[in-house]
Amino acid sequence: MSIVTVQLGQCGNQVGHELLDVICNDPQEGQRKVYSSASCERFFHQSTHGELVARAVLIDMEPKVINQSISRAAKSGRWRYGEASHFSQKQGSGNNWANGYCVHGPRHRAVVEELVRREVERCDRLAGLMAMMSVAGGTGSGVGTYVTECLRDIYPKSFILNHLTWPYGTGEVIVQNYNSVLTLAHLYQLSDAILVHENDTVHRVCSQLLNIKHISFSDVNRVIAHQLGSVLQPVLTADSHGAYSRNPLGELVSALTCHPEYKLLSVSTIPQMPSSSIAYSTFSWPSLLKHLRQMLISNTKMEEGIDWQVCPPAASERSRSLTAPSFNRSLANLLILRGKDVYSAETGGFEDPALYTSWLSSEAAFNLWKSPVPFNKYEKCATLVSNSQALLKPLDNMVGKAWNMFASRAYIHQYVKFGISEEDFLDSFTSLEQVISSYSQLS
C-alpha cells in the first residue's frame, strides 16, 4: 500500500526531500527483492520510462525551496518529483498562521486538492496521507493546517499522519509560539497521529553524536529523515505471517494512538554516528536495547558516552530507575528492529508493566516490528516510537510562552486582521491545556 506525502512550506519540503532520498537509497543491491519492491511501491510509482517518481505533493507560497527540491531530486539520477505535482506563489505567509490558514489556504484550495487527488488516484491501494510541516512559520503551520482540514473532509476514512518539526526554543520567529499553539490545537481534532521532531534535540544529535562542527538545516533534516525512514520502511509485524506490512500508517496509528486524547508521538533511534565510523563499529542487540530502554525511561534522545559492552542492568537497578523523579510514563510504545540477527533480539524489557499507564496492559501497549534487512548502512538499528510524556515539558513551555504573550496582547492584531479572533486563541489554549493535563496524569 502507498503513502502520499504532502510537503508544506520550507521545512516540510526540505525534510520531505531528505526522507524520500533516504528511502530511495536504502534498498541496496543484494538486499531482499521483496523488501525493495515494497519500499518503492510505498513511496514511488514508475513512469513510462521506468523512472521512480515520488508519490508527493509540494506546496509553498514561495517557489525557491520547491525549485531546489525538484532540481536536487532530478540530479540524483535515482528518482524525481512529478512534473505537475507542485504549487507555489510569489509571496509567502509572513510567518503568520492566520495569513496561511485564512487567506492562502482557502484561496488555493481547489488547485491543492486537485494535486493530491491525482497522486491518490495513482495508488493501487492507499495506505494514507502524511503531511509534513513546521509549526513555526506561516505557510507550513497555517496552510498546512488548512490543507489537513481539507484532506480530512475529502478522505474521511483515510489515515492522516502529521509530521511536525518543532522550532528551536531560543526562537526562530517571534510569534512561533502563537503559530505552534494554533497548529497543534487544530491538528489534534483532524489528525490520527502527530509525530514530532524537536529542532533542539536533533541539533544536539548532530553536535554530540555526529560530531558536526558547523550544523546546517540540511544536517538537521537528514537526521530527521533517517529517523522517519527507520519508522516507515517495510517491516514484519507480529501478525504479518512473514509478509511485509501492508498499511504502515494504519498499523502505526493502531499500535500507538488507542485514545483520542493522546496523539503526540516522539522518536528515538540508536545507534547514530558519523558515516565514517559505521564500518568500524559493531553492536549487539542486548546493549542497543538496554540503552534505548534507558533513553525511554529518562526521556533522552541520545546514547552519548555509552559503553557498548556493558551488561543489562540488574533488577534492583531497573527498579530504582523506574521510580526516579524524571521517569517518563508511556501510554504505548512501538519498537522497530532492523538488521542482522534481528530474530535473536530479546525485547522483554520493553514489556515491563512499570513503563506503562495502569489502565492499559503492557501486552496491548507494546508492539514490536522487525526486518532482517539493514537500514541506511547500519548493520543493526533500533527505533522506538513512543506515545509518552516525552513531549509534555516542551508543550507546556510553548503554551506558557504563548499565553504570556497573549496576556500582554503582543502581536494579536497581526492575527485579527486576517480573521483569527481572540476567542480562537482562547479555544486553542483550552484545547492544549486539556492535552497537557491528560499527559500529566498518566499513571
Image (tube, helix red, strand yellow):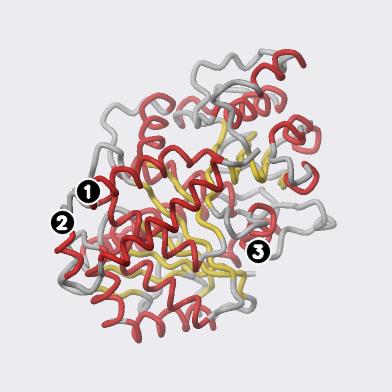
Q: Mark 3 sits on what residue?
A: 250
Q: Nearer the viewer, residue 358 or 348?
A: 358
Query: Which comes sooner in the sequence, label 1 or label 2?
Result: 1
Q: Secondary structure at mark 3?
A: helix
Using residue 156 as the reference point, say whether residue 412 is left or right of it.
left
Is residue 365 visible in the rendered image? The answer is: yes
Q: Secondary structure at mark 1?
A: helix
Is the residue under label 2 in contact with that under label 1 (CB below 8 Å)?
yes
Q: Amino acid at mark 2?
A: Tyr
| Rendering coords of residue 79 (x, y %) | 45, 63
| Rendering coords of residue 361 (x, y %) | 79, 44
Is residue 52 visible in the rendered image? The answer is: no
| Rendering coords of residue 324 (x, y %) | 60, 20
Query: Which comes sooner in the sequence, label 2 or label 3?
Result: 3
Instruction: Please report the residue visible at 28 percent of the width from the left and 58 percent of the height from the top.
Output: 10
Is the residue under label 3 in contact with that under label 1 (CB below 8 Å)?
no
Q: Nearer the viewer, residue 155 or 63?
A: 155
Q: Mark 2 sits on what residue?
A: 411
Cα separation, mark 2 vs mark 3, equals 40 Å
In front: mark 2 or mark 3? 2
Q: Secondary structure at mark 2?
A: loop
Compared to residue 306, the image places residue 184 above or below, namely below
Q: Amino acid at mark 1?
A: Met
Cα separation, mark 1 vs mark 2, equals 8 Å
Q: Amino acid at mark 3?
A: Gly
Q: Quadrant of residue 180?
A: bottom left
Q: Residues within 10 Å of mark 1 (few under 14, many from 20)?
A: some
Compared to residue 162, the image places residue 227 above or below, namely above
Q: Nearer the viewer, residue 436 or 225?
A: 436
Q: Mark 1 sits on what residue?
A: 405
Instruction: Please report the residue visible at 59 percent of the width from the left and 32 percent of the height from the top.
Output: 296
Using residue 142 as the reference point, say whether residue 282 is left or right of it.
right
